[in-house]
Amino acid sequence: MPKRILQGTVTSDKNDQTITVLVERRFKHPLLQKTVRKSKKYRAHDANNQFKVGDAVRIEECAPISKTKRWTVVVEA
């Protein structure tokens, strides 16, 4: 099964080797036909601590690294 890749913005880099990424998705509401924006935060593994707040990044699904980390940073978007 292919791994999911999401694109988002770094909102926090305070923890060692971890960043928090805000991923926003847009979709049309099934009944109202209005474009809706939903966002979700993911914690991703950043081995070299190279990404800072505000960077646009791509994250890829991976095996669990810790209790909350299931994503790794692929490359800066």
Image (cartoon, helix red, strand yellow):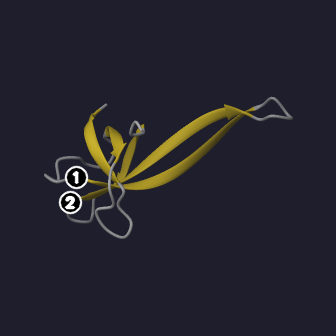
Picture disc at residue 17: 2
The residue located at (31%, 67%) in the rendering is: 66
Which residue type carries mark 1? Asp
Q: Residue at x 23, y 47 (%)?
A: 51
Q: Is residue 27 left or right of residue 13?
A: right
Q: Real-space Cα distance between discs 2 and 1?
A: 5 Å
Q: Earlier in the sequence, mark 2 or mark 1?
A: 2
Disc 2: CA contacts within 10 A as few (<14), some (14-19) or many (>=20)? some
Horizontally, residue 17 falls left or right of residue 40, namely left
- Residue 55: image quadrant is top left
Evaluate if marks 2 and 1 touch, with contact meaning CB atoms under 8 Å apart: yes
| Label total for image | 2
Residue drawn at point x = 47 percent, y = 54 percent: 41
> Residue 26, how many percent across, how many down?
62, 34
Q: Secondary structure at mark 2?
A: loop
| Image height of 4 relative to 72, above or below | above
Q: Residue furthest front?
A: 1
- Quadrant of the drawing holding the C terminus: top left
State which quarter of the image contains the N terminus: top left
Q: Which residue is mark 1?
A: 46
Residue furthest out toward the left: 48
* Mark 2 residue type: Gln
* Residue 46 x, y percent position in the rendering: 22, 52
Q: Is residue 46 left or right of residue 34?
A: left
Q: Position of residue 10 (x, y in %)?
A: 35, 48
Q: Is residue 5 left or right of residue 76?
A: right
Q: Secondary structure at mark 1?
A: loop
- Where is residue 47 drawn, in percent x and y? 16, 54
Mark 1 neighbour density, 10 Å: few (under 14) some (14–19) many (20 or more): many
